[in-house]
Image (cartoon, rainbow, N blue to C red):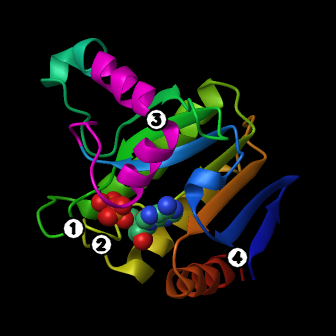
């Protein structure tokens, strides 16, 4: 199953590159420095252009000044999307699986806070990558289950969001997320 409907809202699984999604927002699996990095973070910064890094640096000096300029694990902040087809980027930080004190809570909060930021900004559509399952080493099935359960629960409540997409980069990731979506909505 690659799509499920919850009271006129939809969760969709896609295989592809998140930087091509023309949603209101795409989510970046960033690191705490917000200075860019490898994986999906690097791809988003390359596609958005240097203005994205400039806005991230500004956030470090302002909103994040009280946290030594770092975005804590599980928190989320919004910037513009610049050269991306998406209007905004929501940056969040997933748990480093082997180092985190509570990876389950932190991964759940990364999805939930991203959805909250989108809702506060009255956005309708959002696309997520598989947060935490690349360089941060979270097990795929475990992360897929937390991701989809958190999104599914969020959409049970009133929200401006009607279109939530999971954009999986590999066929294997796509198949694992599809199987988990089937299991949690059965
Ligand atoms: P993390 O540090 O949170 O683990 P990574 O960027 O290393 O983040 O990996 C997260 C997931 O994003 C991985 O499954 C990786 O394959 C995937 N990914 C990498 N580039 C893209 C892209 N352009 N679009 C969507 N997903 C991507």
Cβ of mark 2 under 8 A from ligand 1: yes
Name the residue at the right extreme: 8
Determine which of the numbered discs, if any, sits on residue 185 in the image. 4
**SS at badge 4:** helix
Q: Does residue 173 sit above or below 109 in this rendering?
A: below
In the figure, residue 50 lies in which quadrant?
top left
Residue at the spot x=31%, y=16% of the render?
Answer: 58
Q: Does residue 161 sit above or below 97 in this rendering?
A: above
Q: For the residue carrying disc 4, how many other residues have a C-alpha within 10 Å: few (<14), some (14-19), or many (20+)?
A: few
Residue at the spot x=51%, y=81% of the render?
Answer: 173
Q: CA distance from mark 3 to mark 2?
A: 29 Å
Instruction: Of the two numbered discs 1 and 3 on the same chain, state the one appearing first in sequence.
Output: 3
Instruction: Of the two numbered discs 3 and 2 on the same chain, state the one appearing first in sequence.
Output: 3
Residue 1 magenta-highlighted: no
Q: Nearer the viewer, mark 1 or mark 3?
A: 3
Q: Nearer the viewer, mark 4 or mark 3?
A: 3
Is mark 2 in CB contact (under 8 Å) with mark 1?
yes
In the figure, residue 64 lies in which quadrant?
top left
Instruction: Of the two numbered discs 4 and 1 on the same chain, state the one appearing first in sequence.
Output: 1
What's drawn in magenta, residue-wise?
Answer: 32-59
Residue 148 at what x, y percent from top left? 57, 66
Q: CA distance from mark 1 to mark 3?
A: 30 Å
Q: Is residue 171 visible?
A: yes
Residue at the spot x=57%, y=63% of the render?
Answer: 17
């Amino acid at each position: 199953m690659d799509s499920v409907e919850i009271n006129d809202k939809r969760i969709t699984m896609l295989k592809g590159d998140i930087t091509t999604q023309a949603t209101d927002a795409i989510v970046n699996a960033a690191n705490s420095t917000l200075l860019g990095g490898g994986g999906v973070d690097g791809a988003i910064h390359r596609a958005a252009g240097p203005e994205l890094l400039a806005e991230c640096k500004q956030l470090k000096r302002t909103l994040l000044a009280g946290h030594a300029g770092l975005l804590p694990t599980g928190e989320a902040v919004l910037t513009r999307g610049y050269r991306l087809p998406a209007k905004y980027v929501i940056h969040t930080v997933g748990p480093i699986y082997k180092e985190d004190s509570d990876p389950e809570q932190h991964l759940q909060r990364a999805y939930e806070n991203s959805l909250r930021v989108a809702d506060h900004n009255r956005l309708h559509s959002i696309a997520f990558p598989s947060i935490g399952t690349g360089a941060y080493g979270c097990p795929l099935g475990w992360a897929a289950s937390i991701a989809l359960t958190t999104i599914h629960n969020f959409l049970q409540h009133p929200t401006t969001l009607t279109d939530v997409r999971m954009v999986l980069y590999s066929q294997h990731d796509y198949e694992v997320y599809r199987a988990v979506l089937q299991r949690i909505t059965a």
